[in-house]
Amino acid sequence: MKRIIIHFFIISLVLCTVLFISWILTGCTSINRDLKTVDTDSDQNIMTALKDSINAEMKKKNITGLSIAVADSEGLLWTEGFGLSHKKNRIPFTDETISNIGSVSKLITAAAIMRLVEKNEVDLDDPVSTYIPEFSPITSNIIETPITVRMLLNHQSGLESDAYSGFFLSYEPPEDYRYTYRRALEAVNMSGIVRNPYEIFSYCN
């Protein structure tokens, strides 16, 4: 439960930060395609206030380092790193620092799936096995309705909330990291279904 709360907190922090940045940027009369170079004193004040706010939130929540990117349909508007990527060696966290993507991947995956839905290439109410034939949790027989794409996106599939064990989270990937997808699928299949779909919301990796 503690891990679930921590993951939920991290996602909430990322979403709040992105929403705050978007709100700040809407206050600009015109958006420069490169926000690192601002045209007016007003824009400069907005960017200064934004950076001060980010640094204040990092200090308040004891965040060592992070990077932020803001983009629209035409491309990147602004990228910048804050804090440190290595506390002991005092290495700055830049907009090119490689980070563990963690649960931010859920946002990207969900957006990608919804783009496929827009193109009629994926149906949210199709069984997951329609698109991943190998998807077959060992206790699938306890439910009457197969797990659908929508159930996964809603975190209401009934699957074990954290089925992964032995997956790398460090800087050095294991030798078989290229097969992580297959291992993940095997882990989900072996953990099985622990409750009926839509019974409860359970943050699910």
Image: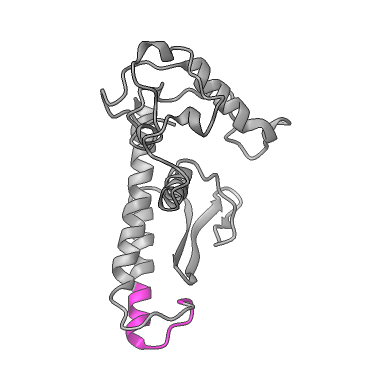
Q: Which residues are magenta?
A: 35-48
State the residue at coordinates (44%, 65%): 70
**Quarter of the image that includes the C terminus:** top left
* Residue that sits furthest to the left in the current view: 199
In the rendered image, the residue lying farthest to the right is 175
Q: Is residue 19 left or right of residue 164?
A: left
- In the picture, residue 50 is in which quadrant? bottom left
Residue 119 horizontal/vertical position (percent): 45, 53
- Is 47 included in the stretch rendered in magenta? yes
For the N terminus, give its image quadrant. top left
Q: Residue 10 or 105: which is nearer the viewer?
A: 105
Q: Nearer the viewer, residue 107 or 83?
A: 107
* Residue 30 percent coordinates (x, y): 35, 83
Magenta region includes residue 130? no
Asked if 44 appears above or below 168 in the picture, the reply is: below
Q: Which residue occupies 62% across, 32% down?
A: 180
Numbered-mark total: 0
Look at the picture and state if 62 lies above or below 202: below
